[in-house]
Amino acid sequence: MDRIYLDYAATTPMDPRVLEAMTPFFIEDFGNPSSTHYFGQKAEAAVDMARLQVAKLLGVQPDEIYFNSGGSEGDNLAIRGAAIARNRQNGSNTILFSPVEHHAISSTAKQLHDEFGYEIVKLRVDNFGQIDLNFLQDSLVKHKVSVVSVVCANNEIGTINPIGEIGKICRQYGVPFHSDTVQACAHLTINAKDENIGMLSASGHKLYGPKGVGVFYKESGLHLSPQMTGGKQENKLRAGTHNVPGIIGFAKALSLAVSEREAENKRLTILRDNIIQFVTQEIPGARLTGHPTDRLPNHASFVFEDLSGNDLVIALDMAGFACSSGSACKVGDPKPSDILLGIGLSPELAKGSLRITLGKYSTEEHIERLLSVLPGIVAKLRK
Ligand SMILES: *Cc1c(COP(=O)(O)O)cnc(C)c1O
């Protein structure tokens, strides 16, 4: 069967140009960047180049970039590292985060609450998943806040948050602001300095780079408690031998994404809007989730009345279409998504979710084929 992949928010295939850039660093230039000899120096020079490239693309300094294993690790470091360090610095004990964060943020905050006694306060969002800025400000006044985390663009509903405004408010109160940009940084222009982002997480495999590698940015002067201790790599913030091919791949993937972004976003927005228009107009009981316009150009997400999203994903898979319901981590989990509940959907409706995410290999024909079968599959499952 000819299968069509429509789950780019879960992961992306690697761009062949990324693989090409990485290849020499597996066999020929295999040195450990921490070694003093020729082999080490060669690998270190390549990592330094990648760091410079990534820093430029994110509008920060190279010594503010930390290579790591991906989005989950960055999210963990931002929350746990800041909570522990700032608690020791100034006695602050509250973690503020939005109800539409990835589990790497919310579960880390919950662990700090359950096992170590930190307070957690959830920010308010509207029905689209955008932050209530007044509530943020009030919370910063009311609590001794260690860290604020708000996702730049949500993975389940595609909504983009006003990161610059959130950053500005956090800056006024001197509280470090972390944004998970894993879904966003390929599609949106991010300038961490202009937007007062104190920490940022990104991941290679969400932008046509390799899995298991990511980037964490932390502004200089902000102290975090390291979560991986050992060697002195990454300015002692993240021990462990550098994943040299992965780092090279990340830098290549991000630079390709940025240079091709404008044209690609235009193309994807047209495809996305075709899906949204068709589904909301042609399928009874279907509703868009997330913001109608402030959303990722590749992201269409819905809930369907009287339908199980898991069943829908399985039926679509049998028809040759790879989509998802909520996040990829929830396969087989019958509980409704926290994020969909967080934007005020009933548990019943939240269970009927479908996410269609597009990418660079998505074509008009793929979308036509999906839309030609979707109404029939939905009607059949509802019987
Ligand atoms: C995928 C994802 C993550 C996790 O990134 P990994 O590199 O897979 O650990 C975190 N946040 C968001 C918004 C994501 O979409």
Image: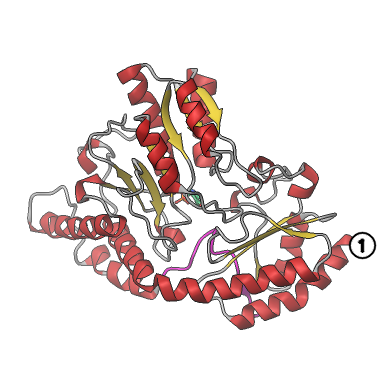
Compared across the picture, whether 7 is left or right of 20 comes to right
Judging by the rendered image, the residue that carries numbered circle 1 is: 383
Quarter of the image where one finds residue 26? bottom left
Task: State the residue at coordinates (76%, 61%).
Answer: 312
- Identify the element where label 1 is drawn: loop
Q: Evaluate whether residue 225 shows in this view.
A: yes
Foreground residue among 378 and 346: 346
Q: Look at the picture and state if 178 lies above or below 270.
A: above
Res 270 → quadrant: bottom right
Looking at the rendered structure, the kind of residue marked 1 is: Lys
Q: Residue furthest right?
A: 383
Residue appearing at x 82%, y 55% in the figure:
305
Q: Is residue 13 magenta?
A: yes
Q: Which stretch is magenta?
A: 1-14
Outermost residue to the left: 37
Where is residue 335? Give x, y as percent. 72, 42
Q: Is residue 219 left or right of residue 78?
A: left
Does the magenta portion include 296? no
Q: Residue at x 23, y 55 (%)?
A: 51
Relative to 157, is 235 on the left or the right?
Answer: left
The image shows residue 147, relative to residue 281, as above or below, that is above
